[in-house]
Amino acid sequence: MRKRALLTALLLPACSYLPQAHGDFVNTPYISRTVGAGVVGEGELEVEGLADIDPGEKAKSTLKVNAGLGPGLEFALGFGPYYSAGSGPDSHGVGDVTVTAKYKYADGTQGRPHGIVELETRLPTSDTGPSGRKGETDALVATSLGQAFGDYSLVGTYELGLLGDDSSDSVVIEHAGVLAVSFRLSPEVRAFTEASMVHEPRASHTEWFGGGGAGWTVSDGLELQGAVQFGLNDEAPDYLLVFGFAYELGPVFPVMRGSGL
């Protein structure tokens, strides 16, 4: 209770100094552990790729196909085409499959924030050895809020992880949070800086990160992304390199776009 009161006392004065919400909202690139406050447009299709590398330790990749199934509703399928758990037998292979549903419950109109809620299931399909595969299903629930304040946009995300535990029948609970400031450097380039944390109560384990990155629109519908995250405490990796892309294929579901077919 004392910690909650202290956090409230710190946040309320900070919120009072925020300028009036206005300007064009700039979402963060697909870099963070969670995914900002946007969804794919109704009837549209998008392909995303992500690779994060902990040099000398681990590397993983993700490829996702996102489909806009209706107003504010997105469905995605993803898999890891490459996963490396470092050295050792069977340490390289494919990663897990993910199934994701996302709903945008606030669209940013009339001064309101952008807001999404997301449900994701991670299926244990990796073929790597014990160092990279645990054979358990994970479930994640996340929500993000974003708002523009002049030239800058603020995006906050909370994620609850319900992680399978291969050593028992219990579920490991994990909390994650991201606070990012994003801004547009030019019509083609958006950038962000962020602070994030991951906390596992059962193990009393907390990782703190800081860093930033940018997205560069190189052609119509195609954005390349890059970022670096630095571990801010002993529990976190020293640093993590992240590379990604997002390619919008445009409207491909005319029925769902209300054509009446």
Image: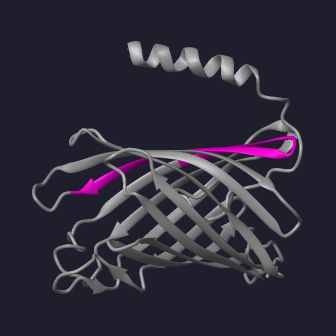
Q: Residue at x 56, y 14 (%)?
A: 9
Residue 146, quarter of picture:
top right
Q: Is residue 95 magenta?
A: no
Quadrant location, the N terminus: top left
What x and y, as percent, mark residue 57?
32, 71
Number of marks in the image? Answer: 0
Q: Is residue 156 magenta?
A: yes
Image coords of residue 218 (percent x, y): 79, 81
| Above or below: residue 122 compared with residue 22 | below
| Direction left: furthest residue | 168
Span colored in magenta: 143-164
The vertical placement of 187 against 172, above or below, is below
SS assignment for the magenta stretch, majority: strand
Q: Nearer the viewer, residue 223 or 78?
A: 223
The one nearer the camera, 1 or 187, is 187
Left or right side of 112 for 230: left
Please determine whether, in this image, residue 227 is positioned above or below residue 174.
Answer: below
In x, y percent, where is residue 140? 41, 55
| Residue 138, x across and y down, in percent | 32, 61
Identified at 45% across, 78% down, the residue is 61
Q: Nearer the viewer, residue 206 or 101?
A: 206
Q: Residue 255, relative to residue 155: is it above or below?
A: below
Q: Which residue is located at x 39 percent, y 75 percent? A: 59
- For residue 131, which quarter of the picture? bottom left
Quarter of the image with the C terminus is bottom right
Relative to residue 177, is residue 261 drawn left or right?
right
What colour scheme was applied to this rendering of the protein? one colour
Query: For the point 77% across and 28% down, which residue is it?
Result: 18
Residue 158 visible, this angle: no
- Residue 146 in view: yes
Is 47 positioned to the left or the right of 184 in the image? Answer: left
